[in-house]
Image (cartoon, coloured by chain):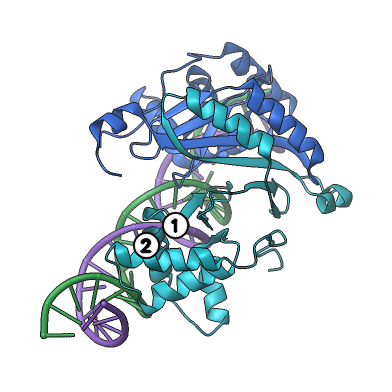
Chain colours: A cyan, B blue, C purple, D green
Amino acid sequence: MSEVDQRAPRRREADPGWLQAAYLTLSEAGYRAGGARSAVIDELAAQDGCVTAEELAGRLMAKDRRVSTASVYRALAVLTELGLLHKVSLGEGRTRFELVSAGGEHHHHLVCDRCGRTVTFEDDDLEGAIRKLSERMPYEIDAHEVTLHGTCSACSAGGVSA
Amino acid sequence: MSEVDQRAPRRREADPGWLQAAYLTLSEAGYRAGGARSAVIDELAAQDGCVTAEELAGRLMAKDRRVSTASVYRALAVLTELGLLHKVSLGEGRTRFELVSAGGEHHHHLVCDRCGRTVTFEDDDLEGAIRKLSERMPYEIDAHEVTLHGTCSACSAGGVSA
DNA sequence: GTTCCTGCAAAGGTTTTGCACCATA
DNA sequence: TATGGTGCAAAACCTTTGCAGGAAC
């Protein structure tokens, strides 16, 4: 199909800092860097990180670096547990994973509900509002996620109803 | 298991306005009010609406008002399509549905990543930031979703690691 | 009476798990 | 070499769909 992987234009083509942090954190936690796990880490670092397990496996296969689905999920689970990845739910029925960069900066998502195209954005006012809000909450907040839903310009122009 | 349905204390015990709007909208759109669909609508109106299909079916079964899973999903799909419900993704691997109240006010979610307990909140500054932001976006924004992740006081006190 | 709704069962898609084999440290 | 990682296949989930019978209008 033609609608796979309509990611936004990449803001961060690669994140070598994350890559090194990932390997370091992993070994410090007593994990080994097996072939499948390393392949997943390398591929994640080479992308903006907002991918599904299936996309990741597909990209690796395209590079002749075949990794089983199970290993992709296992690698993603370990990285998430170590705080190197963050799960993102965009309401597509599957989970996306994105890099947690050392700097703490992050982005949010704008999804076209008609075609699924996704764009990322950042906004200081939004972050400020969330920061103030978090202080008043009864939970210790350590992450947040904002998703805007709408219709992209292509779909608006096309006029296809829903 | 004991960890099912740890919803937050309900802010809105019931929403008769939504109930009536639902039946009206449904009939205006040419839908009939069959037994299963009515049961789902009644149950949704009696709750805060932030439920999964499975929870809904379970609550109905507990009331001796058994509705098949397929019918629950079908009812939820129709109501969502008519704008009476809104899908919510809290990263649990399944979809939650919540009422879209006529007044247009809405809330967001605060999830405890350890136990799954969820609290809802509202914040004007947050809404303002999102409104301004939406105007600058390349998509026509018609909905948004904010999820805060953290650790609730019970889990913090318990000290159970992850 | 016609059309739509419902339940059952089967299928579809994503994610997890068991187990034997292989690679890393 | 010992332990942990990997692949395959099967299972577990959530959700959707086909179809025959029943209910609403």
Q: Can I make out residue B39 in this image?
A: no
Q: Earlier in the sequence, mark 1 or mark 2?
A: 2
Amino acid type for the residue under numbered disc 1: Leu
Q: Eyeballing the image, is B69 above or below C9?
A: above
* Residue closest to the eye, A48 or A3: A48
Query: Which mark is on residue A25?
Result: 2
Residue at image point 80% right, 40% down: B136
Q: Position of residue B118 (x, y in %)?
A: 43, 30
Between B70 and A57, the residue placed more toward the observer is A57
Q: Residue at x 42, y 62 (%)?
A: A76
Quarter of the image containing the C terminus of chain B?
top left
Q: Secondary structure at mark 1?
A: loop
Task: Decide: few, some or many residues near mark 2? Use Cα within 10 Å; few <14, some 14-19, many ≥20.
Answer: some
Question: What residue did someone put label 1 on?
Answer: A84
Distance Cα–Cα, label 1 vs label 2: 8 Å
Compare residues B121 and B84 and report the one nearer the observer. B121
Q: Name which residue type carries label 2.
A: Thr
Binning the other alpha carbons within 10 Å of mark 1 as few (below 14), some (14 to 19) or many (20 upward) gives many
The numbered disc on residue B156 is none
Mark 1 vs mark 2: same chain? yes
Which image quarter holds the N terminus of chain B? Answer: top left
Side of A50 relative to A77 (left or right): right
Q: Residue furthest right?
A: A157
